[in-house]
């Protein structure tokens, strides 16, 4: 890989600035991808343009990328299925009963209860971030709309409970990936090190506490406060110029006439999707386990060795098949209706699939440029041991922000942070935690993050509005985390 120096940082940074200023995410990402390949083509416009096209094609060389894009498209079919079956309507009826009961006992608390329920749901679905964000957005969007809670708030809750819970309860593909990176660095007890680092992983802990405080106190600040004021005064769930990730065809799809609204027609397919995630992780990783000590050990290690992208894709397919069988048995849909709705749902979410394609393409371009390696190498020579955890956190955050991927950041930074911790005799658990927390922090702030994109999509929110409203809360958590790492660095090193 060639060394492009400071130039390697320009494409993702310019793409992010352009996206935030113009709100044209596709155009911003396309420019970032093209500019990356233009640099790598020695500023030859023709070669750079052709390389950009090939860069999009190369995205599909990765089975994981392809599965994620397929998952993004198939989610549209699932959303239309559960809406057409009146399952969403049935869930709203049940939730409204709970809200009425709460209002009867304590007036004005229904908004708090619903937001707390959404938060707890996101935390409990720690098995996979995309499924967590998708489920929270899908389940609670109609209720949030009815209670006049802005779409940006739902996207914030979905996004800020998905990755933090997955990193703090690492019995999932995240934990498997992190353990694999620790093993690569020669760590003798990767599982124990990963678990011990949780206590020092301040960013996700603070993020969850901020979500809780915002909900309970009913005090917002920054763009989110303006969004709440807009919805409260005008009833508008989004800004006038907003472009929600879900079209009206998905959020307001016509339901089946003559069918009783039943909550289980929505809950069962979604529950199947969530349940099948660990099952598929175990299945895809089963043959990769060597010398298991028993069935329990085999299952646990298989989940750790499983394919996250495969598990997500298989889970949504299982959910779709379950929905088809349920709805066919109840006489809600015939075969032709199922096919038509499936194709309709896929077509409605093609913009999301396209956005995922762009996000993967700019990530590949950044890897080819060596963006993460440059940032890490640039900083490692002048680091003071006491400042190591805080600086590692900031660098990890910047790499994740620029590339839109926390996992890619983990892969880059673990290979640098662990050797640096050993050289400077720093507390290893603190440095590992700073690396992981920084990756999640940068991912939360980045408009090209797949987790943020899924959160916007599931919540029916304008993506840039979601990023702008979430950013102040993420920055507060990031600043507090940096100060904590500075303090702990002084204590332990």
Image: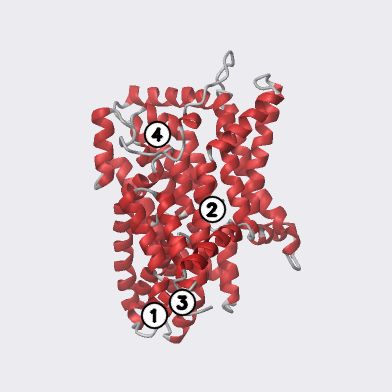
Q: Quadrant of the N terminus?
A: bottom right
In the image, residue 455 sits, relative to residue 343, either above or below, namely below
Q: Is residue 161 visible?
A: no
Q: Is residue 332 visible?
A: yes
State the SS at label 2: helix
Q: CA distance from mark 2 to mark 1?
A: 30 Å
The residue to which callout 2 is attached is 357
The residue to which callout 4 is attached is 114
The residue to which callout 1 is attached is 378
State the SS at label 1: helix
Q: Nearer the viewer, mark 3 or mark 2?
A: 2
Q: Residue at x 41, y 75 (%)?
A: 375
In the image, residue 6 sits, relative to residue 436, either above or below, namely below
In the image, residue 344 sits, relative to residue 167, either above or below, namely above
Image location of residue 92, percent across then percent down: 47, 25
CB atoms at circles 4 and 2 under 8 Å apart?
A: no
Residue 155 image-quadrant placement: top left
Q: Residue at x 49, y 72 (%)?
A: 40
In the image, residue 293 sits, relative to residue 340, either above or below, namely below
The residue to which callout 3 is attached is 417
Q: Earlier in the sequence, mark 1 or mark 4?
A: 4
């Amino acid at each position: 890989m060639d060394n492009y120096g400071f130039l390697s940082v320009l494409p993702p940074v310019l793409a992010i600035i352009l996206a935030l200023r113009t709100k044209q995410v596709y155009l911003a990402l396309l420019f970032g991808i093209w500019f990356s390949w233009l640099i790598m083509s020695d500023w030859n416009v023709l070669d750079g343009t052709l390389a950009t096209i090939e860069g999009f094609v190369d995205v599909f060389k990765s089975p994981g990328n392809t599965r994620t894009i397929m998952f993004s498209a198939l989610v549209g079919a699932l959303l239309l299925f559960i809406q057409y079956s009146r399952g969403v309507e049935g869930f709203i009826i049940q939730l409204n009963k709970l809200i009425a009961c709460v209002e009867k006992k304590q007036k004005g608390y229904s908004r708090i209860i619903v937001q707390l329920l959404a938060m707890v749901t996101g935390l409990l679905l720690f098995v996979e971030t995309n499924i967590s964000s998708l489920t929270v957005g899908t389940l609670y969007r109609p209720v949030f709309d009815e209670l006049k809670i802005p779409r940006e708030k739902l996207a914030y809750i979905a996004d800020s409970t998905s990755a933090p819970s997955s990193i703090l309860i690492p019995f999932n593909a995240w934990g498997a990936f992190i353990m694999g990176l620790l093993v690569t660095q020669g760590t003798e007890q990767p599982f124990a090190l990963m678990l011990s680092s949780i206590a020092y992983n301040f960013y996700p802990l603070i993020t969850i506490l901020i979500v809780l405080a915002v909900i309970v106190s009913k005090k917002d600040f920054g763009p989110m406060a303006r969004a709440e004021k807009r919805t409260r005064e005008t009833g508008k769930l989004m800004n006038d110029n907003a472009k929600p990730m879900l079209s009206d065809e998905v959020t307001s799809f016509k339901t089946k006439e003559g069918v009783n609204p039943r909550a289980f027609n929505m809950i069962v397919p979604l529950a199947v999707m969530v349940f099948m995630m660990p099952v598929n992780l175990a299945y895809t990783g089963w043959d990769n386990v060597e010398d298991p000590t028993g069935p329990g050990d085999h299952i646990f290690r298989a989940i750790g060795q499983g394919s996250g992208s495969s598990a997500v894709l298989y889970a949504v397919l299982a959910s779709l098949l379950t929905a088809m069988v349920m709805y066919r048995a109840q006489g809600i849909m015939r075969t032709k209706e199922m096919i038509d709705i499936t194709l309709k749902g896929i077509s409605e979410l093609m913009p999301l699939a396209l956005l995922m394609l762009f996000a993967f393409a700019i990530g590949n371009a950044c890897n080819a440029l060596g963006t993460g390696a440059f940032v890490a190498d640039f900083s490692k020579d002048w680091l003071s041991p006491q400042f190591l955890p805080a600086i590692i956190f900031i660098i990890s955050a910047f790499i994740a922000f620029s590339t839109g991927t926390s996992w890619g950041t983990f892969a880059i930074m673990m290979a640098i942070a662990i050797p640096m911790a050993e050289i400077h005799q720093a507390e290893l658990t603190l440095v590992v935690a700073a690396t992981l927390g920084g990756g999640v922090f940068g991912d939360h702030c980045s408009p090209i993050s797949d987790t943020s994109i899924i959160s916007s999509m599931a919540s029916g929110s304008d993506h840039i509005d979601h990023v702008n409203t979430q950013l102040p809360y993420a920055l507060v958590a990031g600043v507090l985390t940096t100060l904590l790492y500075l303090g702990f660095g002084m204590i332990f090193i």
